[in-house]
Image (cartoon, rainbow, N blue to C red):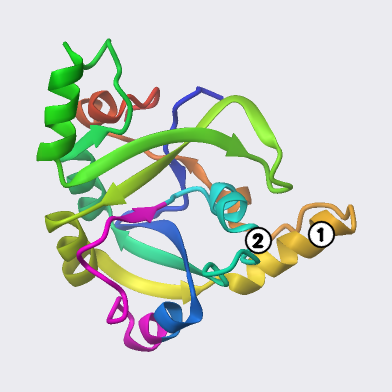
Amino acid sequence: MPQHTLRACFDDTTVRVYQAFRPEIARPALEAGRFVPPFKRDRMTWIKPSFNWMMYRCGYAQKPGQEYVLGVDITREGLEWALAHAALSTFTPSVHPSQDAWRHALQASPVRVQWDPERDWRLQPLPHVRSIQIGLSGEAVARYVDSWIVRIEDVTPLARDAAHAAATHAPMPPHLPCAHERPYPLPDHLAAICQSDHAG
């Protein structure tokens, strides 16, 4: 598997990302089908296409403040707008001519892209494989909340299934989303912006 690949569950029009929240944010979002207060638009919010990375980040929905895991289907146009307006979270000499140029890009961009060590469903690191996280702020959060979201689903039961199987050394439950994630066909210019190895 290439080291930097945006893998996700997607169809012709939407792509699924994951977020974990406390109940006070998750429940109103599920009822409304969109994020509503107390969700804060003025804070950076991170979306994760990898179910396994979300499981690692929230500890199978067992970490305080991350008791609900939401699967959020957003438009592919929204995802690609985000990547087109993104800056890398770390200085990359092959991309940035200087540290100052990188810092300027961070300040000017409403989206941040970060690559972290990918995990398997048991939360063990996969050597040499990275998982993308996409941080949305400012205009990007407004677009996410108001325009991109097609559906929000409570996938916390899947987190519990994964946790139980891992704890009992059972095989991977076949219905986990990670079984269906595949490389997203990024246009070349977006792959270059986010430093993905895979382009469409």
Q: Earlier in the sequence, mark 2 or mark 1?
A: 2
- Image coordinates of residue 76 in percent, x first then y, are 27, 52
Q: Which residues are magenta?
A: 28-47
Q: Secondary structure at mark 1?
A: helix
Q: Quadrant of the C terminus?
A: top left
Q: CA distance from mark 2 to mark 1?
A: 11 Å
Per the image, is 119 magenta?
no
Q: Quadrant of the N terminus?
A: top right
- Image coordinates of residue 100 in percent, x first then y, are 14, 20
130 vs 33, left or right, is: right
User: Which residue is drawn at the image coordinates 84% and 52% (left, top)?
Assistant: 171
Q: Which residue is mark 1?
A: 165
Per the image, is 35 magenta?
yes
Q: Main secondary structure of the magenta part?
A: loop
Say which amino acid is labelled 1: Ala
112 vs 100, left or right, is: right
Q: Which residue is mark 2?
A: 60
Q: Which mark is residue 121?
A: none
Q: Nearer the viewer, residue 24 or 80?
A: 24
Within-10-Å neighbours for mark 1: few <14, some 14–19, many 20+: some
Instruction: Name above or below for residue 67 compared with residue 190.
Output: below
Q: Nearer the viewer, mark 2 or mark 1?
A: 2
User: Which residue is drawn at the image coordinates 28% and 55% (left, top)?
Assistant: 44
Say which amino acid is labelled 2: Tyr
Q: Secondary structure at mark 2?
A: loop
Within-10-Å neighbours for mark 2: few <14, some 14–19, many 20+: many
- Image coordinates of residue 63 in percent, x first then y, are 61, 64
- Image coordinates of residue 158 in percent, x first then y, are 65, 67
In the rendered image, which quarter is residue 185 located in? top left
User: Which residue is drawn at the image coordinates 21% and 54% (left, top)?
Assistant: 137
User: Which residue is drawn at the image coordinates 19% and 24% (left, top)?
Assistant: 102
